[in-house]
Image (cartoon, rainbow, N blue to C red):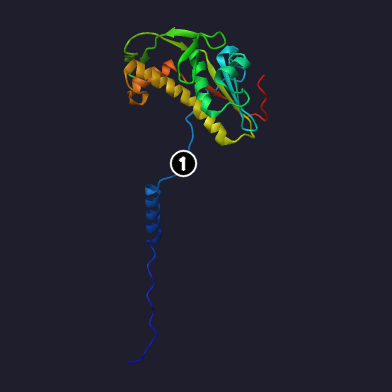
Amino acid sequence: MAKGSRKVPGINASSTADISFILLIFFLVVTSMSHQTGLNSRLPEKTEDNTPPPKILQRNVLAVNVNMHSKILVKPGDMDVQEFESRYDVKVTDVPFEKLRWIAKDFICNQITDARGNVVAQGLETYPVMIDTFVVWKDKDGNSHALPDNQPRNISKNHVITLTTDRASEYSVYFKVANELYGAYNELRDQLAQDAYGKSYKDLDGNQQEVCQQYYKLKIYEAKPQEYTETVQ
């Protein structure tokens, strides 16, 4: 039998593209995407350019600055610098992370506490005015929710914390500073939850958490980064 050349049949690749597409979808679905750690922040609502900024008394402002050397500067209300430094054993031009939350909580509540959390002074004229307030929260169905004891709480309604950073400062420092300031509100809400409901804030239902949030509204204003940071006077 004569030998002849035989043609090798080619591979049918007509379905290769479909298989590749299916595999791509599969890996997109099952692969977990990594994400960066960050802080939840509520941005201010957009206003008209000609809207004048609200007037805020200096006693209502806790100014926190991170300068170009990543040092933390704090100006608390109208409190005298020497008095502030002696009470918290810090320098206003170099406040450590571990004392920021303590300082912020005292400012929000218009009080002075010692290192153990004992209140040693209240109702300071250099800190925000406290007002007896009773909050009623209405959910999306129109149902009202309030604290179980139906008693008003003495809270600060006009305070604000400003956070300004220098463009040359380290982002990790900004992140730690912001974390301590946000943490101050979280701890105050948790203290209110323990006092009013007998359990921690995280264990409350959504409406109960909303009630606590109304007593300690998050009032942190983050200004755009500056090219330089002035020394606190």
Which image quarter holds the N terminus? Answer: bottom left
Q: Quadrant of residue 136?
A: top left
User: At which x and y percent is residue 100?
Assistant: 53, 24
Q: Residue at x 37, y 15 (%)?
A: 137
Q: Badge 1 local density, few (<14 within 10 Å), some, or many (20+)?
A: few
Q: Quadrant of the C terminus?
A: top right
Rendered position, 16 above or below 149:
below
Q: Secondary structure at mark 1?
A: loop
Could you say where residue 218 lies in the image, as x and y percent from the top left? 48, 21
Residue 208 versus residue 119: which sits nearer the camera?
119
Q: Which residue does the image show at 38% across and 87% down from the upper left?
A: 4
* Residue 200: % across, % down: 35, 23
| Residue marked by disc 1 | 35
203 vs 221, nearest the viewer:
203
Is 76 placed above or below 18 here?
above
Residue at image position (39%, 22%) is 190
Q: Residue furthest bottom?
A: 1
Q: Quadrant of residue 205?
A: top left
Q: Position of residue 26 (x, y in %)?
A: 37, 51
Q: Answer left or right for 79 relative to 130.
A: right
Residue at image coords 47%, 8%:
131
Q: Does any portion of residue 52 appear in the rendered image? A: no
